[in-house]
Amino acid sequence: MLPKKQRVKTALFGQIVRSRLGANAPLFRIKYLRGNFKPSLFAVAVPKSVCRRIVDRNAVKRRISGSLEEGMKKNSIAEGFASIIFANKHINAGARPELEQQLLSVFQKIGCFKLRD
């Protein structure tokens, strides 16, 4: 689970969803805002169209959050980002290493993660 200080608050969630900034990957899509966020904020959303049962949606959320935390440990995080990760229907077929690799590549593309030397 993400630390509380790095989670997107409810009031900010709607602003991010309405944002035009985004990036796509085969397993998920990301909407984000750039601003004065210290530290960067993250949220995970799994719609009912992906998994009908709440236990399945929670499992997907935990898998994405775990992959995100691994990426945060391996890479330095740029400040000033608020991001929401929306799962796609193909998320159930994706293995965890594939999910971690896609998260890393998309966050590097938008400038949120920077590789540590």
Image (spheres, helix red, strand yellow):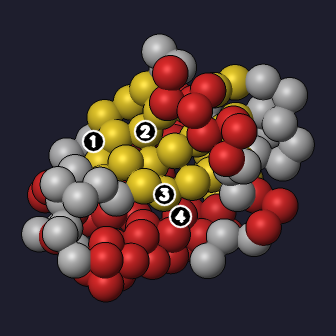
Left or right: 72 in relation to 66: right
Image quarter of residue 89: bottom left
Image quarter of residue 74: bottom right
Q: x and y percent of residue 26 in the render?
A: 19, 46
What is the secondary structure assignment of the residue under circle 4?
A: helix
Dot placed on the residue nearer the N-terminal end, 2 or 1: 1
Crowd tier of the residue under label 4, counting other residues whose Cα lies within 10 Å: few below 14, some 14–19, many 20 or above:
many
Q: Which residue is mark 1?
A: 25
Q: x and y percent of residue 9 in the render?
A: 72, 49
Foreground: disc 2 or disc 1: 2
Say whether residue 105 is visible: no
What is the secondary structure assignment of the residue under circle 3?
A: strand
Q: Nearer the viewer, residue 28 or 52?
A: 52
Left or right: 1 in relation to 87: right
User: Between marks 3 and 1, how big is the CA–CA gap?
Assistant: 15 Å
Residue 30: assigned label: 2
Q: Which residue is mark 3?
A: 44
Q: Is residue 117 above or below residue 17?
A: below
Marks 4 and 3: CB-CB under 8 Å? yes
Dot placed on the residue nearer the N-terminal end, 4 or 3: 3
Marks 2 and 1: CB-CB under 8 Å? yes
Residue 68: assigned label: 4
Marks 2 and 4: CB-CB under 8 Å? no
Left or right: 67 in relation to 23: right
